Image (tube, rainbow, N blue to C red):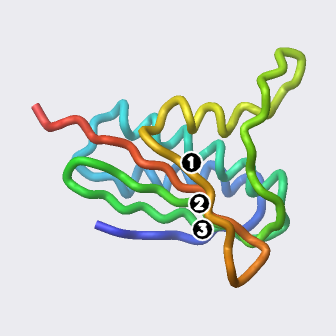
Amino acid sequence: MRTSQEFSNAPLEIGSARNFVSETLVGVAQEAIEDTCLMVSELATNCVRHTSSRFVVRIDQMAESLRVEVADGGGGEPVLRPIQMTEPGGRGLRIVQSLSDQWGVIPSSATSGKLVWFTLALPKPA
């Protein structure tokens, strides 16, 4: 199953993106849903904080894995930042790196935007 939804660049839309993920994932273990919601929340937060563009969340759910993409039209390239205990932010990509099986960034060739993606293996149903 493949689906996507576009969101406006507003803080309330971060929660809407999480809701989209939790409502879209069918037959997926609760832990995988929670991890996916957290990663999407972090990426959506980056879109809202660092761009002024709308963003799109795409979910490709397969039998044994998920691929999730968050794309925006804003400039800049996401990079892993060193963790600074005194900084209140800057951990989003570290969270994605920690929870996902793979992740990456694809710059847009058509606009100044980019797409951040991650994959997550799904546990086999009991």
- Apparent side of residue 19 relative to residue 85 in the rendered image (left or right): left
Q: Quadrant of the C terminus?
A: top left
Q: Do the residues labelled 2 and 1 touch (CB within 8 Å)?
A: yes
The three-letter amino acid code for the residue at tag 3 is: Val
In this rendering, is residue 27 above or below 73?
A: above
Q: What residue type is labelled 2?
A: Val
Q: Earlier in the sequence, mark 3 or mark 2?
A: 3
Q: Name the residue located 84 percent from the left edge and 20 percent from the top edge.
A: 84
Q: How far apart are marks 3 and 2 (CA)?
A: 6 Å
**Residue located at (28% from left, 66% from top):** 1
Residue 9 on image: x %, y %: 76, 64
- What amino acid is found at the position of numbered circle 1 in the picture? Val
Residue 58 position, x and y percent, is 48, 65
Residue 32: quadrant of the picture:
top left
Q: Which of marks 3 and 1 is nearer the N terminus?
A: 1
Alpha carbon of mark 2 to alpha carbon of mark 1: how far?
A: 7 Å
Residue 72 left/right relative to 76: left
Q: Earlier in the sequence, mark 2 or mark 1?
A: 1
Residue 17 is marked as none
The answer to whether mark 3 and mark 2 are in CB contact below 8 A is yes
Residue identifier under label 3? 56
Q: Name the residue under label 2.
A: 70
Which dot marks residue 40? 1
